[in-house]
Amino acid sequence: MNTALVKEDWLAEPGHHLIEKESEDFPALLSQLSDPPEQLFIIGNVDALHMPALAIVGSRNPTEQGRRNAYEFAKHLGRCGFCIVSGLAEGIDAAAHEGALAGNAMTVAFLGHGIDQVYPPANRQLAERIAASNGAVCTEFPLGTPPRRENFPQRNRLISGLSMGTLVVEAASRSGSLISARLAAEQGREIFAIPGSIHNPLSRGCHKLIRQGAKLVESADDIISELGPLVRHMAQIPDPQKPSDPGTAKGDADYEMLLDAMAFDPVSADELSNRSGLTIDQVSSMLLILELEGKIESQAGGRYSRLHR
């Protein structure tokens, strides 16, 4: 089989992308990893990989309450401007992707195999909906790579690596989700965990994480309060709520320039980047800050508009 020809045929399909590590489109957070992927195969919207992101992971066989928690947290945080990242697995992963879609938010699914297949097969339609709804389905594995067990821990480092924080919803004491949390800690990311009943075996992993220093989460606001300032810090964006001084004047001007470029008609982050001259990473982070402050709102299809004052 001519693999180069197969790759060329795959890339010829609409919405298919291949980003090399040296490309300007390569996600900045992934490039900072000690073992970044050499390439990313992507179906869908490349801009989704530049949004401020939160990973949501957990059991493949959750309780109904755990499934609802993943769905509702993803829906609410997606509406607040976060891109929801997970692994397209059954259970918590699928519920997180579904919640993001219900909130008209971007969501990114990382695969543990080649992008020319979907595992589990039951989530094929979900993968198609993610790619068609301004999200992205991604993998570092070459076309034709089967879903081997050893691929998934390797995949997990990209889920946590693309995200500013990882929320563990339900996890047994020995769980792949705890591997994701450990990787997140090694990558310097925030770790969040939802506590549960002491009688629920799927609460033990979360309780273990909390004992080890993960932030206990009771509501989405617990995550927003932690990650809001971090978004600004990671993008080196001054706080527009603080009094201006020579060090923050340019940051204030950038916010005003972004709002002027937006006007009141829905517009995408990519178009705002072109209009303002700011990078897509800067624009994505600033949009989240402005949305948390109630100055803009996200629309369907990954677009944003100013709120009338």
Image: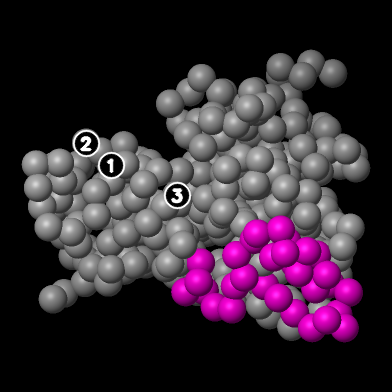
As rendered, which of 12 and 173 lies closer to the eye? Answer: 173
Mark 1 vs mark 2, CA separation in Å:
6 Å
Identify which residue is drawn at 54% across, 78% down. Answer: 219
The residue that disc 1 covers is 273
| Label 3 vs 1, first from the N-terminus | 3
**Residue 242 sits in quarter:** bottom left
| Label 3 vs 2, first from the N-terminus | 3
Q: Is residue 20 magenta?
A: no
Give the answer, above or below, for where 135 lies relative to 112: below
Mark 3 vs mark 2, CA separation in Å:
17 Å
Q: Residues within 10 Å of mark 2 (few under 14, many from 20)?
A: few
Helix, strand or loop for disc 2: loop
As rendered, which of 171 and 81 lies closer to the eye? Answer: 171
The answer to whether residue 188 is left or right of residue 224 is right
The residue that disc 2 covers is 277
- Residue 85 image offset from top left, x and y in percent: 60, 54
> Which quadrant does the N terminus fall into?
top right
Type of the residue with mark 2? Gly
State yes or no: discs 1 and 2 in contact (Cβ < 8 Å).
yes
Mark 3 vs mark 1, CA separation in Å:
13 Å
Helix, strand or loop for disc 1: helix
> Which quadrant does the C terminus fall into?
bottom left
**Res. 253 in view:** no
Tag of residue 51: 3
Q: Which residues are magenta?
A: 194-223
- Residue 275 image offset from top left, x and y in percent: 20, 42
**Res. 263 in view:** yes
Type of the residue with mark 1? Ser
The answer to whether residue 286 is left or right of residue 132 is left
**Residue 177 sits in quarter:** bottom right
Identify which residue is drawn at 32% across, 65% down. Answer: 291
- Residue 202 image offset from top left, x and y in percent: 84, 72
